[in-house]
Amino acid sequence: MNSFEVQGGLQLKGDITPQGAKNEALQVICAVLLSPDEVIIDNLPDILDVNNLIDLLQDLGVTVNRLSAKKCSFKAENIKLDYLKTKEFRKRAASLRGSIMIMGPLLARFGKAYFPKPGGDKIGRRRMDTHFFGFEKLGATFNFDSDDIFYTVHAEKLEGSYMLLDEASVTGTANIIMAAVLTPGKTVIYNAACEPYIQQLCRMLNSMGAKINGVGSNLLTIEGVKALKGCKHRILPDMIEIGSFIGLAAMTGSEITIKDAATDHLGIIPLAFRRMGINMHISKNEIYIPPKQKYTIETFIDGSIMTISDAPWPGLTPDLLSVFLVVATQANGSVLIHQKMFESRLFFVDKLIDMGARIILCDPHRATVIGLNHETPLRASVMTSPDIRAGVALLIAALSAKGKSIIHNIEQIDRGYEQIDQRLNQLGAKIKRI
Ligand SMILES: CC(=O)N[C@H]1[C@@H](OP(=O)(O)OP(=O)(O)OC[C@H]2O[C@@H](n3ccc(=O)[nH]c3=O)[C@H](O)[C@@H]2O)O[C@H](CO)[C@@H](O)[C@@H]1O
Ligand SMILES: C=C(OP(=O)(O)O)C(=O)O
């Protein structure tokens, strides 16, 4: 288990460029399984989840060539389906959530797919019903071995159909889209997730010859095609990393410019930070956060306490709520953080309370934060990162705190943030990997 030793209380200054988006990378890497032709993906983040998925595909028979640090070529010509029954596969698949998205492409191309319990953050129940509901609607048979926790889908023949998803699951929608693009006939997916990375997946599939209409909306119409060809695809900057840098700058009083931020794709994220009182200058591609801000959380029009809550896109992504929560600890004013989607994602607030933050955990989904208005800094502490986003929130807390903090289990942070210690040290932070 690796740890970070963080010297807090320093103001950072400079430019930072976000990595390619983790959650887009996981979708589009799985999509290479849909074609035997070469697919080239650029702007891949160098993070544990992505590297584990690439290794998994290689073991599955995909030829992978690193063209440069961030660019890879994939050729899924000779797939070894027997690999899906090995112990090695179970181990790899269980290391990340995104690997579940190999099922849709394998079902579409080979008529069968298997999957063990996927990994990813332990942040509450993470059901996969939507994925299998969609596959069944396309004509697949589904089996779940509950003793072994092993999912199987197979189909003699798939056929396009209409489906109304029970929830707008992100990976569920991606999986169903990838199965439907090679399924004969017309598939209509209503209540589809439509966040930017699903949109990117659809654009990539269309450039491979798929026929997907309605991209960006929650109603997708897909005309199945016989085969897909190769393509070149570039991954968007990671909006969660961008949000994490905005929060970090505000909390530590740092002056940071986020370069290459593709600000058209951030949806409601900038507005949510503005409602926290954070001042930013946003242009087409850059976000400048001025130094030494005191930020005052808005109230609602009637004067009642602001709520920051998550919702499926175009609502606020749940992956940034831990960052909003930590930023609120030094705001002027109060806010209710309501994490609606996941029930075990707020327990890390105990660590912030130890550091002196004023937080009441109302229930597993809701925490009220009363800001310290930068009058009293948080105290340094020793803590353990429970999940990827709480991990980065704790890192922000440690960077703002007085003294030296230790964060254990930083593999959780490395799952989704590329060399975060080195990149922040270039801005003047003092983070040591120990
Ligand atoms: C690898 C990957 O891409 N992971 C992301 C993906 O996970 P993932 O695809 O696993 O998440 P889902 O979208 O399926 O669901 C997330 C949670 O929200 C609940 N839910 C979902 C939709 C809805 O309309 N109502 C509702 O309550 C689900 O029951 C679940 O508890 O999307 C999540 C939601 O943006 C993100 O946190 C994860 O980072
Ligand atoms: C929850 C997340 O990831 P995963 O779905 O991969 O666990 C996340 O990226 O915040």
Image (cartoon, helix red, strand yellow):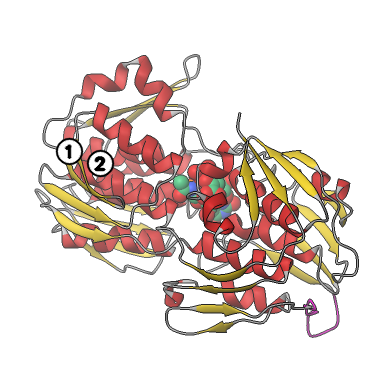
Spot occupied by residue 91 in the image (x, y as percentages of width and height): 42, 22
Which image quarter is the N terminus in? Answer: top right
Which image quarter is the C terminus in? Answer: top right
Say if the magenta span includes residue 360.
no
What's the residue at 32%, 58% (across, down)? 43
Residue range highlighted in magenta: 295-304
What's the residue at 22%, 24% (across, down)? 81
**Image position of 88 (left or right of 330):** left
Residue 145 falls in image quadrant: top left
Q: Is residue 44 visible?
A: yes
Spot occupied by residue 62 in the image (x, y as percentages of width and height): 19, 34
Report which residue position mark 2 lands on: 105
Q: Is mark 2 within 8 Å of ligand 1?
A: no
Q: Are marks 1 and 2 in contact (CB under 8 Å)?
A: yes
What's the residue at 13%, 59% (across, down)? 209
Q: Is residue 157 visible?
A: no
Report the front residue among 12 and 312.
12
Question: Which amino acid lies under the numbered mark 1 shown in the image of this protein?
Answer: Arg
- Kindly identify which numbered label has been placed on residue 143: none
Say if the magenta span includes residue 303.
yes
What secondary structure is marked by label 2?
Answer: helix
What's the residue at 31%, 17% (across, down)? 85
- Kindly identify which numbered label has been placed on residue 109: 1
* Crowd rating for badge 2 (residues with CA inside 10 Å; few <14, some 14–19, many 20+): many
Spot occupied by residue 192 in the image (x, y as percentages of width and height): 41, 58
* Crowd rating for badge 1 (residues with CA inside 10 Å; few <14, some 14–19, many 20+): some
Marks 1/2: CA distance? 6 Å
What secondary structure is marked by label 1?
Answer: helix
Report the front residue among 312 and 94.
94
**Image position of 236 (left or right of 388):** left
Question: Which amino acid lies under the numbered mark 2 shown in the image of this protein?
Answer: Pro
